[in-house]
Image: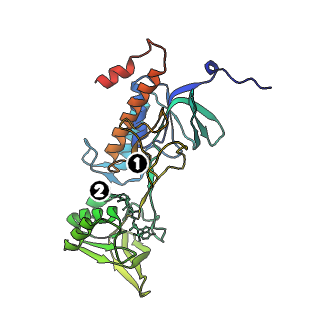
Amino acid sequence: MQRQPEMAEIEIYDVIIIGGGPAGLTAGIYAKRAALKAVLIEKGVPGGQVAITKGVENYPGFIDIGGFELSDKFFQHAKCYDLETIREEVVAIEPGIDFHSVRLSSGELLNAHSIIMAAGGTSRRLNVAGEIENFGKGVSYCATCDGFFFRDKIVCVVGGGDTALEDALYLAKITRHVYLIHRRDEFRASRILQQRIAADPNIETILNTVVTEIKANEQGVCGVCLKNLQTSEDKDLEVDGVFIFVGFSPNSALVPRGIKTSTTGYVLTDESCETAIPGIFAAGDLRQNYAKQIVIAASEGCIAALAAARYVESRKPVGKHSAIERETAR
Ligand code: NAP
């Protein structure tokens, strides 16, 4: 019979961070500053959604910075503390009593006293021709990030929820004209937003209509093909940009049972970002929070790492406390 390894024989990290976006990388910086044995696992390029954003103009300290450049700065900052990183996919989180485990696609199992889930989320796609090809060339999923690039231009917004209407109002202040295209004859968004949309002379609403194709030339997006679902009539519309807000899905596939989530899949935590399972934290776009912004993801990464450090230290023998107390006191 195979002998079970003793606790002392198992390599146990203090914290495993899943996700290399602003939340995960900030958690990595704070974890290393708190002298934790930490590893960050990211299946793609570091930076998450930010790395594929054209420009960022609302991260404090940077008036205008490329999304890739900003995420690389986060990565380099984490690396300067020697944060260990693994480029692989996590396939499962297995909560335990003495420690938690993370299973990688290779089959390897990593153990840790605490886990920070920072896997982010993904804007839902329309799945029409021209959408993926023109991402960053006129197709956007973030008005706050990209709206400024469409000053005095004509754009369309697709969707009928709060995000679509809020962002149409935001874009109406910057752009020359906004078409708001929705597939039904009534919006899902709140009444107050609907009233503001109706009162805004710069917004033209097109209902019962879907975008069937996004067209582009060498300069980028130049128009959309529309279909009226009631009359089946097809129509072309000239636009310089297409903002798609048809929902956002948290990357919650890994969230283990026992952790509470909202009806839409966002992880519910307390104010220290700790979930219903002690030692497992969530930060950034995966977490139920007020807004999906880089600065918020980064701040939640900080909170989760400090709270994880406190959790880890509380499980260690007396006399080992110090780094986290110094860090939180600053
Ligand atoms: P959402 O409420 O899920 O709305 C998505 C919209 O996209 C719906 O109008 C839907 O149409 C439409 N849609 C979905 N798939 C489509 C497709 N393939 N083609 C065309 N249209 C499609 O998403 P959200 O607006 O991102 O909001 C997500 C959550 O955050 C909501 O609970 C929302 O209330 C909340 N939120 C709140 C605020 C705020 O309180 N200030 C701001 C933003 C978001 P149908 O209506 O026909 O289904």
Instruction: Identify the residue position indicated by label 2 in the image.
Output: 144
Instruction: Identify the residue position indicated by label 1 in the image.
Output: 285
Looking at the rendering, the quadrant in which ligand 1 lies is: bottom left
Q: Secondary structure at mark 1?
A: helix
Disc on the earlier residue, 1 or 2: 2
Taking depth in this image into account, of 120 and 130 the one nearest to the observer is 120
Residue 156, located in which quarter of the rendered image?
A: bottom left
Residue 110: image x %, image y %? Answer: 59, 32
Q: Cβ–Cβ below 8 Å for labels 1 and 2? A: no
Residue 102: image x %, image y %? Answer: 58, 37
Mark 2 residue's CB less than 8 Å from ligand 1: no
**Three-letter code for the amino acid on which mark 2 is drawn:** Thr
Q: Residue at x 39, y 44 (%)?
A: 284
Around disc 1, counting alpha carbons within 10 Å, would you say few (fewer than 14), some (14 to 19), or many (20 or more)? many
Residue 295: image x %, image y %? Answer: 31, 43
Q: Secondary structure at mark 2?
A: helix
**Three-letter code for the amino acid on which mark 1 is drawn:** Asp
Residue 249, located in which quarter of the rendered image?
A: bottom left
Name above or below for residue 62 compared with residue 136.
above
Picture quarter with the C terminus: top left
